[in-house]
Image (cartoon, rainbow, N blue to C red):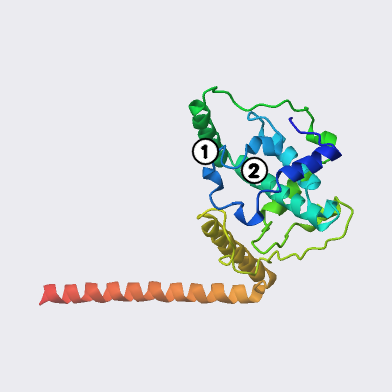
Amino acid sequence: MTVVIFRHEKLHTGLFQCSWIHISNLRLYGTAATQSCNEHRDLYQTLGVEPSATAKEIKAAYYQLSKIYHPDRHDGEKQKHLAAEKFLQVAEAYEILSSNEKRKTYDKKCQERWMQTPTGSWPTQMKVKKNFEDLGLDYKTFEDFQRSVNTRKRWSQHDHWQMPDEFFAHFGSRREFTNTFRPRTATYFTYSYKDPMQRQREMKEWQILMEIEKEKEKSKYKTPAFVIMERERKMRELSEKRTVNVLLLAFGCLTVLLYIRLT
């Protein structure tokens, strides 16, 4: 797997290079899938992976960079601000490259751009191969972290961080930002969605969850055996009455027909 090993001086260089990008001009999730490969920067270079990197390599690179550029790991307002901008670039790159559909769209645009260049060559860079297990990470822990990140709003337009608590546990520091993760009981239509179908999917999941909760509530209060037996007895009586009524009706019809023939 391809992961970049960042040294301390390289980190500050990267932070300085990204300082010209204002945070309000970053397009995190709006039209990320249609972003051109030269519009802001090469997303593969942002994550420090090759264009042929696998999904696991991209995940490992994102996890490492998100720890390096997280504002809590830097001192001073300026460094925190630069780290926040770099962190958003990494999140934007991962948002596109972690989705097969968005990554195909991005690669297609990059290929079209490559065909239009005079040299016709991909931007390449030598990277150091490294397994994500070598980072001291447990894969299950990483998957749980990634799943929790996807269920939260990671950044809003009001400079408000919303990262999961388990993310801060890896830093060994206490959480300083407000957690606005909403419980399951909250409605979903107040969120800013990444794609038009996300609201429909979440509303469907919410309906299924409510049905499951209702079934659980019903199972808590089981019907006593004698009540069930009484219901069955009443059903049998009702069935017997219907049978008798059908026989009486049939007998009445036959009597009428016989009387008509005789007269």
Query: Which dot marks residue 105?
Result: 1
Instruction: Compare marks 2 and 1 and give the one earlier in the sequence.
Output: 2
Residue beneath the point at 88% across and 56% down:
173
* Separation of marks 2 and 1 at Cα, in angstroms: 13 Å
Q: Which residue is mark 2?
A: 93
Going by the numbered disc 1, the residue's amino acid type is: Thr
Going by the numbered disc 2, the residue's amino acid type is: Ala
Give whichever of 175, 123 is nearer the camera. 123
What SS does tag 1 mark?
Answer: helix
* As drawn, 82 above or below 231: above
Q: Is residue 90 left or right of residue 96?
A: right
Image quadrant containing the C terminus: bottom left
What SS does tag 2 mark?
Answer: helix
* Res 199 quadrant in image: bottom right
Q: Position of residue 4 (x, y in %)?
A: 77, 33
Q: Are marks 2 and 1 in contact (CB under 8 Å)?
A: no
* Res 65 quadrant in image: top right
Give whichever of 27, 50 is nearer the camera. 27
Q: Position of residue 3 (x, y in %)?
A: 76, 33
